[in-house]
Image (cartoon, coloured by chain):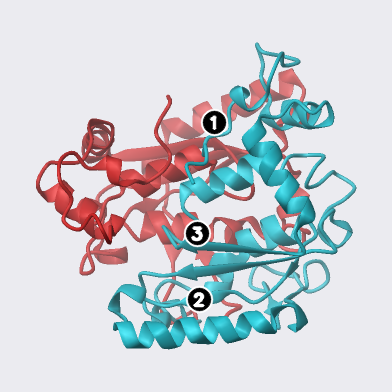
Chain colours: A red, B cyan
Amino acid sequence: MKFKATATAEDITGKVKNADHFCYGEETKLAWEAGKLTADITEEQRKLTEADLVIFQFPMYWFTVPAIMKGWMDRVLTLGFAFTHEKRYSQGIFKDKKAMLSFTTGSQESMFSANGINGDMNVTLWPLQNGIFHYCGFQVLAPQIFWALSHVPSEARGTMLEGWRKRMQGLLGENTLAFTPLDCLNDMMSIKLLL
Amino acid sequence: MKFKATATAEDITGKVKNADHFCYGEETKLAWEAGKLTADITEEQRKLTEADLVIFQFPMYWFTVPAIMKGWMDRVLTLGFAFTHEKRYSQGIFKDKKAMLSFTTGSQESMFSANGINGDMNVTLWPLQNGIFHYCGFQVLAPQIFWALSHVPSEARGTMLEGWRKRMQGLLGENTLAFTPLDCLNDMMSIKLLL
C-alpha cells in the first residue's frame, strides 16, 4: 500500500479557507465536514467507521511506527472525524471500538524491560497508546510484540505466529488496558498502564 | 522541502542484496557502505556530519513529529552511519554533537503537566529524546516548546520568538539533559530526565 505519508494542503479537494496561512488541522476539519477530503483519506475513514477492532501491524522503526503509518494517523484521524475538543479520552469518538499495536522489534525484550537500556516498552508506547488510541476513545488491547525477529529461527517464528493466531481468537474478550491519567499522574514518574 | 517520507527499497540505487526478502535496515547499511543511498539521503547525512547542533523544528502532530520528519529519521539515520550495535547511547556515533526539539503544540501546557490529561511532556518526548537522539549519542538540549500557539495573540508570539532568539545565543553553553537509563530504571515508573 503506497499510502501518502505527508499531511499537505493537497489532502483537500477544491479551495481551502486560508491558503496564505494554511492550518492543516482546521482546514481538514472543514474539508471533512464538507466531504472534501481526498479519496484515499475518505476510504480509510470509511473502513475505520465500520471496524470494531483495528490492529496496527508494523515493524518498529525508531521506537514507534514507521513514517508511512504515522502519515496514516496524521491524515486519517481528522479533527471532527476522530476527535473534537469535547470528545476525547473517555468521552472519545471511538469509545465503542478497540485498537491495538502488533509489531516486530530489532531489540531483544531485555533491552525494553523496566531496567533495560531502552527504557520500559510501556513508556515507549505511551504516545501511541495514550496519545493516539486513548485520545480518540479507543479501548486499547495489550500490544502483540514479536521481539528481535531477525534473530529468531524459522521454527520458532512458526510458534510465535501460532501464538498470535490463538490470541486473535479470544482478542475481543480480553481485558483492555486501563489508563490512569489524572489522579495517578501526580508526578513525572507515575505513568501507569495497568492490565 | 518535499522530503520523501516512506522508507522503501527505492532508497538504494542499483541492486539490493536480497530483493525477495528485503530488509530495510540491513540493505541500507550495505548501501551506505557502498555509497549507494539515494542523493536526498546522502545530502542530509552530509549536513548532519557537518553539524555541531541539530534543531528539529516542527508542529507536534499526535504527540510526536509529523510523518515527514519521522521519515527523515527513518531514512537518514542509517545503521552504520548513525549507530551500530556497539556504538549506541553514551558510546553513540554523534556523541560530540547536540540535538534538540523545538515545536508548537495544539494543547495548553497544563494538559501536559505531570498530572495533566495528556501525561507529562517528558514522557511523551522519551521515544524521541532517548530513543532517537540519545540512542545515536547526541547530547540533548531541553526542548523549546511553544504551547497552544493558535491561541496566542500576535504580540505574545513576538515575545515568544524573542525569548527563543535570546535562548539560541547561549544554546551551546546550556547543560544537556541527563539520561539515567540503567541503574535508575528499576521499575516502570522511573523514567527520569534531569536537567
Q: A158 left or right of B63?
A: right
Amino acid under disc 2? Ile
Q: Is residue A169 above or below residue B3?
A: above
Which quarter of the figure is the C terminus of chain B placed in?
A: bottom right
Q: Is residue B186 above or below residue A117?
A: below
Q: Residue B55: x percent and y percent? A: 62, 65
Q: Secondary structure at mark 3?
A: loop
Distance between mark 1 and mark 2 Cα atoms: 41 Å
Q: A30 left or right of B28?
A: left
Q: Residues within 10 Å of mark 1 (few under 14, many from 20)?
A: some
- In the picture of the structure, the residue carrying the numbered disc 2 is B145
Q: Residue at x 20, y 58 (%)?
A: A18
Q: Residues within 10 Å of mark 2 (few under 14, many from 20)?
A: some
- In the picture of the structure, the residue carrying the numbered disc 1 is A164
Q: Residue A91: x percent and y percent? A: 24, 65
Q: Residue at x 54, y 81 (%)?
A: B164
Amino acid under disc 3? Thr
Q: A117 left or right of B165?
A: right
Q: Residue at x 73, y 83 (%)?
A: B174
Q: Is residue A105 visible?
A: no
